[in-house]
Image (cartoon, grey):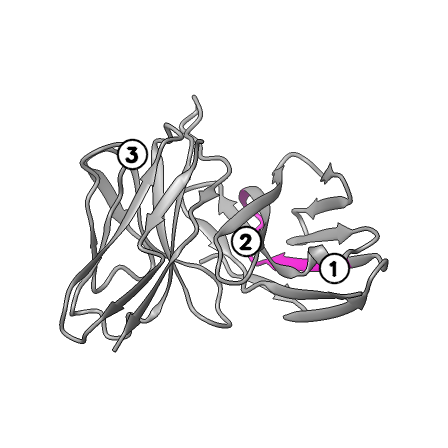
Amino acid sequence: KQEVTQIPAALSVPEGENLVLNCSFTDSAIYNLQWFRQDPGKGLTSLLLIQSSQREQTSGRLNASLDKSSGRSTLYIAASQPGDSATYLCAVRANTGNQFYFGTGTSLTVIP
Amino acid sequence: DGGITQSPKYLFRKEGQNVTLSCEQNLNHDAMYWYRQDPGQGLRLIYYSQIVNDFQKGDIAEGYSVSREKKESFPLTVTSAQKNPTAFYLCASSPIDRGRNLDTQYFGPGTRLTVL
């Protein structure tokens, strides 16, 4: 069964700092990987989707990379802002079956 | 507005009672999902459905039931058989492309269920 891990579980940074969030998965046979943002008590909002054939995706200050062979993905946030404070989750979908497997998330706090 | 709605936002239940959580989407998505989220844990899949009148169990289906009578609706019933139902419940939907593969998921705002 696919296992998805996110390290660190929590992270605090001063405003303006660049940061990297990590996601690792045990089975490299994935169809795609997705990064989500979750605000307290709310649903998930999709940030970036990387297909298995892609190496990275960018949206504004966010850049997600995928190294399928090593089972890793990173989410890079440039010039962090207090509004970026949230929990960030990654999820992978396997090549077979129709389930998405989620990590436990990284809780990010950007200090003004 | 297109999107996914869940109701109610907060729900309280007495032990031994069944309760039904609503999920509706107007995105014309074929696939719908129910997840449970507990503090410090990732989302765990309860049930999912790819087509009307068909659904599959996820990793933690025991104590839950679903129906998919309409494409837009995927209600979840938490039965009295669920031993620890207090949690945050999230519904999601996803399109299915021509290759019958699933793409990104779109989530509702969630329902927080508390058993008293």
Q: Which quarter of the image is occupied by the C terminus of chain A?
A: bottom right
* Label drawn at residue A109: none
In this view, B77 is above or below A47 = below
Between marks 1 and 2 in the image, the one whose residue lies nearer the viewer = 1
Does residue A72 appear left or right of residue B107 in this picture? right
Between marks 2 and 3 in the image, the one whose residue lies nearer the viewer = 3
Q: Earlier in the sequence, mark 1 or mark 2?
A: 2
Q: Estimate how packed mark 3 is, as few (under 14), some (14 to 19) or many (20 or more) residues with alpha carbons within 10 Å.
A: some
Q: Label 1: state its secondary structure.
A: helix
Given the image, what chain letter belongs to the residue carrying mark 1? A
x%, y% of residue A50? 63, 39
x%, y% of residue B76? 24, 52
Q: Which residue is mark 1?
A: A82
Does residue A44 appear left or right of residue A107 in this picture? left
Q: Which residue is mark 3?
A: B72
**Both marks 1 and 3 on one chain:** no
Q: Label 2: state its secondary structure.
A: loop
Question: Which span of residues is magenta-colored?
Answer: A20-31
Q: Gap in Å between the C-alphas at discs 1 and 3?
A: 36 Å
Q: Label 3: state its secondary structure.
A: loop
Q: Which residue is mark 2?
A: A27
The image quarter in which residue B93 lies = top left
Inspect the image, locate mark 3, and give the three-letter code of the amino acid beneath it. Answer: Glu
Does residue B101 appear left or right of residue B31 in this picture? right
The residue lying furthest to the top in this view is B98
Q: Nearer the viewer, residue B112 or B60?
A: B112
The image quarter in which residue A39 lies = bottom right
Inspect the image, locate mark 1, and give the three-letter code of the amino acid beneath it. Answer: Pro
Given the image, what chain letter belongs to the residue carrying mark 3? B
A27 magenta-colored: yes
Q: Residue placed at 78% from the left, 44% from the top?
A: A61
Q: Residue placed at 54% from the left, 64% from the top?
A: A104
